[in-house]
Image (cartoon, rainbow, N blue to C red):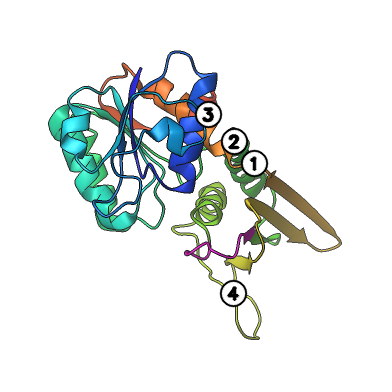
């Protein structure tokens, strides 16, 4: 499986390079970064702290895709649109882990999926993938007088809040409740909660990799579903498993739930 990593110098790009040692079928044929990256021209294996693999960091995605089966993109929302368009032109499957994508990107992804396999995941952890399905099931099973609150914590450098994973969990809960949207937001003041609101609380500090808890709060009882990530490598392994899943698939939209064989896909 020939893989191109976009965002190669980022935390996830380097983690995926290291995790590739656990997947003997994986060959990293492209490591893409910004044109002003300090790693440009360096062997991505050495940059990741492993042995040289013979693939140097470049800014030319189109050239790298010419010899690829799957692109794994953990870059930024500003350039992911162009990256997906290049994948479509090259006939290469796209796994996108970039967060902060807007509704317009969803339209682009739907168009690209007519030509190539596309999987967009706010979180590539297998545990979080299962958590989202459990949240959907709990939201569907519990009566609407159980309030839904989502609490997430990440390291001090994380840019988006709530996290993409928290929002994905909110969407799973909204689907379970058959709501039109995941109503709610980060609270900064007082006032009673809105009916059917899904609320988000955000913690930022230290080196927290990622903690997420979805609480269902009823009268006299509370149900909590949680996931804690202690090692960024779980996301890298999940991304490589998802890339392996996509390899050879027909054009279409896929989800992380399918990667772990969930019958009901959240």
Say if 105 sits above or below 117 in the image.
below
Q: Distance between the residues labelled 2 and 3?
A: 9 Å
Q: Distance between the residues labelled 4 and 2?
A: 36 Å
Q: Any magenta on residue 155?
A: yes
Q: How crowded is mark 1: few (under 14 residues within 10 Å), some or many (20 or more)?
A: few
Mark 4 vs 1, N-terminal side: 4
On the image, which quarter does residue 244 sit in?
Answer: top left
Q: How crowded is mark 4: few (under 14 residues within 10 Å), some or many (20 or more)?
A: few
Under tag 1, what secondary structure?
loop
The dot on residue 19 is 3
Q: Are marks 4 and 1 in contact (CB under 8 Å)?
A: no
For the question of whether residue 238 can be seen, the reply is: no
The dot on residue 175 is none
For the question of whether residue 109 can be seen, the reply is: yes
**Which contiguous range is marked in magenta?**
153-162
Q: Are marks 2 and 1 in contact (CB under 8 Å)?
A: yes
The dot on residue 231 is 1
Under tag 2, what secondary structure?
helix
Mark 2 vs 3, N-terminal side: 3
Q: Which residue is drawn at 53% across and 48% down?
A: 172
């Amino acid at each position: 499986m020939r893989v191109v990593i976009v965002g190669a110098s980022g935390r996830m790009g380097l983690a995926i390079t290291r995790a590739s040692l656990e997947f003997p079928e994986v060959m990293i044929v492209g490591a893409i970064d910004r044109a002003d990256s300090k790693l440009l021209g360096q062997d991505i294996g050495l940059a990741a702290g492993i042995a040289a693999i013979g693939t140097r960091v470049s800014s030319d995605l189109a050239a790298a895709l010419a010899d690829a089966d799957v692109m794994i993109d953990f870059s930024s929302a500003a350039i992911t649109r162009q990256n997906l368009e290049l994948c479509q032109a090259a006939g290469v499957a796209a796994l996108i882990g970039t967060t902060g994508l807007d509704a317009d990107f969803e339209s682009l992804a739907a168009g690209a999926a007519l030509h190539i396999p596309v999987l967009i995941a706010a979180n590539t952890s297998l545990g979080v993938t299962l958590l989202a399905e459990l949240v959907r099931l709990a939201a569907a099973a519990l009566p609407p007088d159980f309030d839904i609150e989502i609490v997430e914590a990440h390291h001090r450098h994380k840019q988006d809040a709530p996290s993409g994973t928290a929002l994905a969990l909110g969407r799973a809960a909204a689907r379970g409740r058959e709501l039109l949207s995941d109503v709610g937001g980060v609270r900064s003041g007082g006032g009673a909660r809105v009916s059917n609101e899904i609320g988000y609380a955000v913690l930022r500090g230290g080196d927290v990799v990622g903690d997420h808890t979805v609480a269902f709060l009823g009268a006299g009882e509370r149900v909590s579903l949680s996931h804690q990530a202690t090692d960024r490598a779980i996301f890298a392994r999940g991304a490589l498993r998802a890339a392996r899943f996509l390899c050879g698939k027909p054009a279409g939209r896929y989800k992380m739930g399918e990667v772990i064989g969930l019958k009901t896909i959240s």
